[in-house]
Image (cartoon, grey):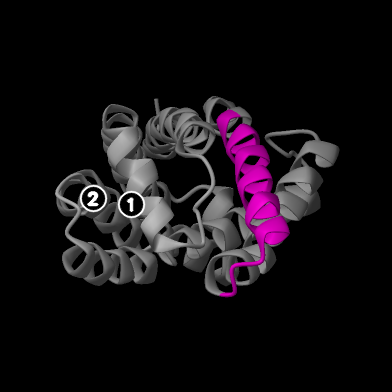
Amino acid sequence: MSHTDTGMRVAGAWLAIASALLGFTLIGHGPIHPDLGQQMKVIADGATRWLIVHWIAAASLSLFAVAGLIAPSAGSRLTESWWTLSAWAVVPVGALWTVTTAVAEATVVANAAAANDVARFEAWWAFTEGNANGLMFLCLVVAVIAGNETRSHHPLTPVWASFVGVVAGIGAVVSWPLGMWFDIGLFGQLCGASSIVMSLWMLWFGPAHRSLA
């Protein structure tokens, strides 16, 4: 088995597992309440679920980072262009930014909510909100990679599915700032839905790497 074949099979396997875990995380996380006092109560009342979801998110993002490190070194057609090579290189950056959010929310944020420590909660919540923007980078990467598949003569997923991946990735990128920065509820829900669809495409795309020679 060639270096390219081995590398892309391994990257695809980790990508598929990461995508499945991310989908579970997005479904289990639930919407963010615009009022921090109410968000503290949500976390404190559902402490077990909050911890499980965010540790799974940390595992998912760590595996995305692994896939993003392996794929560029495999030398497949998925990284032949400067934009696709750059996109794969951004995967570990976005993942590592966001994994700090997941770990902080599973530890210090959860503890602050349980103790009703408003000052500590608000300070760490601001930190997690800032680093969570790394997820927007991952969504943009998915749009680029899926877009490259729509142009390929031998796509790993059907063109229609890759097009859905593009739309989902762009939808998540556009709706993220409107939902998370400006607290427009409709766009927050759109971002969540787009991210779930994006995860489903990646879950399909990952195992398809075995067909790369």
Identify the residue position indicated by label 1 in the image.
40
Which part of the image, by quadrant, shows the N terminus? top left
Residue 144 visible in the displayed image: yes
* Image position of 15 (left or right of 100): right
Task: Decide which of tag 2 and tag 1 comes sooner along the chain.
Answer: 1
Please report the bounds of the magenta region as a residue range: 182-203
Asked if the residue under mark 1 is in contact with the one under mark 2, i.e. CB atoms within 8 Å, the reply is yes
Q: Quadrant of residue 120?
A: bottom left
Tell me the quarter of the picture where residue 139 sits: bottom right
Q: Amino acid at mark 2?
A: Ala
Residue at (52%, 33%) from the top-left corner?
Answer: 23
- Dot 2, how many residues are within 10 Å of its Cα: few (below 14), some (14-19), or many (20+)? many
Q: Is residue 162 left or right of residue 38?
A: right
User: Where residue 35 sits in the image (x, y, percent)?
Assistant: 47, 62
Q: Main secondary structure of the magenta part?
A: helix
**Point 43% across, 30% down: residue:** 21
Is 44 located above or below residue 206 in the figure? below
User: Is disc 2 placed on a helix, strand or loop?
Assistant: helix
Q: Is residue 20 above or below residue 168?
A: above
Q: Position of residue 119 (x, y in %)?
A: 19, 70
Amino acid type, label 1: Met
